[in-house]
Image (cartoon, grey):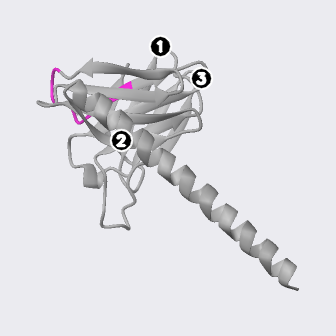
């Protein structure tokens, strides 16, 4: 009987160590990426941990750039887009061999935006940005896309009734 208890105790200890080491590595990676961005005079809005990398949606001091950075076993990398006019929302698209991401910054009444719809030749996706039943909302989001957008695509922000608020064609 005591052998069985000892075995269960060891299994629980191993599980706790594995869980906390995974959480700890994410926070370490996030801190490393935050430091990398700060060294380049950027600050992150938010982070996303994927199987392959840690991503950050970021901007510069005067918010005239929007960027998406990644940190993986291959090192650091980032891309930026310059924001010329204050639009209802800004976006940046990034991809690698197998993953597609879009970073969104909602500039106009983010509390009213519930969904982001992406429409294109090979893509039609809808993603939840904010839940209207919750008091909390976010103005920035990093979304992993299921498909790669083609040259002609549209981004739409939608309200809780799935009515289009704003639309940008590319």
Q: Is residue 7 left or right of residue 67?
A: right
Label 3, label 2: how far apart the Cα atoms are: 36 Å
Pick whichever, 28 or 165, lies toward us.
28
Label 2, label 1: how far apart the Cα atoms are: 35 Å
**Residue at screen point 53% across, 37% down:** 125
**Magenta-highlighted residues:** 84-92
Q: Which circle, 3 or 2, is nearer the viewer?
A: 2
Q: Which quarter of the rendered picture does the N terminus lie within?
A: bottom right
Q: Which quarter of the rendered picture does the C terminus lie within?
A: top left
Pick whichever, 127 or 53, lies toward us.
53
Which residue was labeled with disc 3?
A: 122
Q: Is residue 150 visible?
A: yes
Q: Is residue 116 visible?
A: no
Q: Is there a contact, CB below 8 Å, between mark 2 and mark 1?
A: no
Q: Earlier in the sequence, mark 3 or mark 2?
A: 2
Per the rendering, the mark at residue 151 is: 1
> Considering the numbered disc 2 on the image, is that residue within a helix, a strand or a loop?
helix
Which residue was labeled with disc 2?
A: 31
Residue 25 screen position, x and y as percent: 50, 46
> Considering the numbered disc 3 on the image, is that residue within a helix, a strand or a loop?
loop
Residue 13 screen position, x and y as percent: 66, 67
């Amino acid at each position: 009987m005591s052998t069985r208890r000892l075995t269960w105790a060891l299994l629980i200890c191993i599980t706790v160590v594995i869980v906390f080491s995974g959480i700890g590595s994410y926070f370490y990676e996030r801190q490393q990426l935050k430091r990398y961005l700060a060294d380049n005079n950027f600050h992150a809005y938010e982070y996303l941990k994927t199987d392959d990398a840690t991503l950050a949606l970021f901007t510069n001091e005067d918010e005239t750039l929007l960027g998406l950075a990644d940190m993986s076993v291959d090192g650091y990398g980032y891309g930026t887009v310059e924001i010329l006019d204050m639009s209802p929302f800004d976006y940046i698209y990034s991809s690698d061999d197998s993953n597609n991401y879009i970073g969104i910054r909602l500039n106009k009444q983010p509390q009213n935006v519930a969904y982001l719809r992406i429409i294109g030749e090979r893509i039609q996706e809808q993603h939840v940005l904010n839940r209207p039943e919750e008091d909390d909302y976010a103005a920035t989001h990093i979304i992993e896309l299921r498909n790669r957008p083609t040259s002609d695509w549209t981004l739409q922000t939608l309200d809780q009734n799935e009515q289009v608020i704003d639309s940008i064609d590319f």
